[in-house]
Image: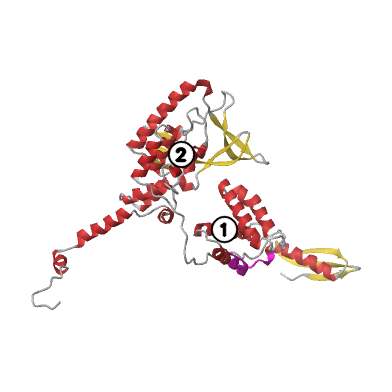
């Protein structure tokens, strides 16, 4: 394949370059009508690069990284990521990424620029490694798509950047609930059946908060003692139709079937019977909900909103955790109880979500294999379970040491550690 050739035809210039042959015949692309040789060469170069890129023109991206992040979030994130992830990316971009490197042109940003930025960020702020890792995901993902998906840049400067070493790694404190704390909480809220049942379900299953409040009675098989986890709820800014949406689980592996023991089975059975009695008691004033498909500007269904029924013809969404009159308030159900738990009961810095880690730790310490614990929690990777949800209990560590001690201490060891002073020895 030859290079670009410029020829003069009367008063104008023409570019010409050879392309792939067809049926053994040589083929060319050419265009004439340029006033100067330089204009013909510039146009020919653009056309040649477009041909090399299979018809896609390459234009050096001179937009700012800040503008590109907005473009990336609108065009990629909003069509491929979950709502909460999009909100996180938007917030982190606005607060930490745009103010520092957003003003640079995309075409001028180098690996050195990005490495310096992430290193300075780690040195400047006292965040956990996971928090910084989310910012790294934004940078890597946005530049990956700028290069591979949109063709804005030819080289991906984020390809080799990584998290710098952190001398002191700040870890998010996770509360490990004790039996005494659980009993204290249950006694305090014994008259709030919905909270009690939701709390016990989290205690005995380790479900994510969003998964728990997405449960319908169709997901719960009390005869077989299983719960099918298929969905998760999330909230958005409230409008006239509400703010709660039901979507897929956090990950594909989050869709799972878990078994429940007799304690939780009994609690759910009694709670369901009470709910049926309340439906009869409230009659027509009891509130029911259905799923409304929310479509984007292209007419495609992108979200499913939980909407209050306005007529009898709508199919009921038989949600498990609702208030006595049927009102669905999602995870808001936890707000008041946990304010009481923190301030009145004095159990500081605990969250409902910490029941998940407490469940994982206790199940593992009871002898369950780590792979099975990961399956129960809906984790694809065992490392996630080990790194984020398992905590050692001080009593268990002492028990393990004592057990090792008893199994490995022999009569010989006992005799030699007495270190008695023999007769005639000098002290």
Query: Disc number at residue 135?
Result: 1
Q: Position of residue 235 (x, y in %)?
A: 56, 41
In percent of the image, x 28 and y 57: which residue is there? 398
Q: Nearer the viewer, residue 172 or 1?
A: 172
Who comes first in sequence, dot 2 or dot 1? 1
In percent of the image, x 86 and y 65: which residue is there? 34
Query: Disc number at residue 337?
Result: 2
**Colour scheme of the picture:** secondary structure
Looking at the image, is 321 positioned above or below residue 372?
above
Looking at the image, is 160 positioned above or below residue 283?
below
Q: Position of residue 286 (x, y in %)?
A: 51, 25
In percent of the image, x 66 and y 39: which residue is there? 299
**Marks 2 and 1: which is nearer the front?**
2
- Is 333 magenta? The answer is no
Q: Nearer the viewer, residue 186 or 399?
A: 186
Could you classify mark 2 by the number of other residues whose Cα lies within 10 Å: few (under 14), some (14-19), or many (20 or more)?
Answer: some
Query: Disc number at residue 20?
Result: none
């Amino acid at each position: 394949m030859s290079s670009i050739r410029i020829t003069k035809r009367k008063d104008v210039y023409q570019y010409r370059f050879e392309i792939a042959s067809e049926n053994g015949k040589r083929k060319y692309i050419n265009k004439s009508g340029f006033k100067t040789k330089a204009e013909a060469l510039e146009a020919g170069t653009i056309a040649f690069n477009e041909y090399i890129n299979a018809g896609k023109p390459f234009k050096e991206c001179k937009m700012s990284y800040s503008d590109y992040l907005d473009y990336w979030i609108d065009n990629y994130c909003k069509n491929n990521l979950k709502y909460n992830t999009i909100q996180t990316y938007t917030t982190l971009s606005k607060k930490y990424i745009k103010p520092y490197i957003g003003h640079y042109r995309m075409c001028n940003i180098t690996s050195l620029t990005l490495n310096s930025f992430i290193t300075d960020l780690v040195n400047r702020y006292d965040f956990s490694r996971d928090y910084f890792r989310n910012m790294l995901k934004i940078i890597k993902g946005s530049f990956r798509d700028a290069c591979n998906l949109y063709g804005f840049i030819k080289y991906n400067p984020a390809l080799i950047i990584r998290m710098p070493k952190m001398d002191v790694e700040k870890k998010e404190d996770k509360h490990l609930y004790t039996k005494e704390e659980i009993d204290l909480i249950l006694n305090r809220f014994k008259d709030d059946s919905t909270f009690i049942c939701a709390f016990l379900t989290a205690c005995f299953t380790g479900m994510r908060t969003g998964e728990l409040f997405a449960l319908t009675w169709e997901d719960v098989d009390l005869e077989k003692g299983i719960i099918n986890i298929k969905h998760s709820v999330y909230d958005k800014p409230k409008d006239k139709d509400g703010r709660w949406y039901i979507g897929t689980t956090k990950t594909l592996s989050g869709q799972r079937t878990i078994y429940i023991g007799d304690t939780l089975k009994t609690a759910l059975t009694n709670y369901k019977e009470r709910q049926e009695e309340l439906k009869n008691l409230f009659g027509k004033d009891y509130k029911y909900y259905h799923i409304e498909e929310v479509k984007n500007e292209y007419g495609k269904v992108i979200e499913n909103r939980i909407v209050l029924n306005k007529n009898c013809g709508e199919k009921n969404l038989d949600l498990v955790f609702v208030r006595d009159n049927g009102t669905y308030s999602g995870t808001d159900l936890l707000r008041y109880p946990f304010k009481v738990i923190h301030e009145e009961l004095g159990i500081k810095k605990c969250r409902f979500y910490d029941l998940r880690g407490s469940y994982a730790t206790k199940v593992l310490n009871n002898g369950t294999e780590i792979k099975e614990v990961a399956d129960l929690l809906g984790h694809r990777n065992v490392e996630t379970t080990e790194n984020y949800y398992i905590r050692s209990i001080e009593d268990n560590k002492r028990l393990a040491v004592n057990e090792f001690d008893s199994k490995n201490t022999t009569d010989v060891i006992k005799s030699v550690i007495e270190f008695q002073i023999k007769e005639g020895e000098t002290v």
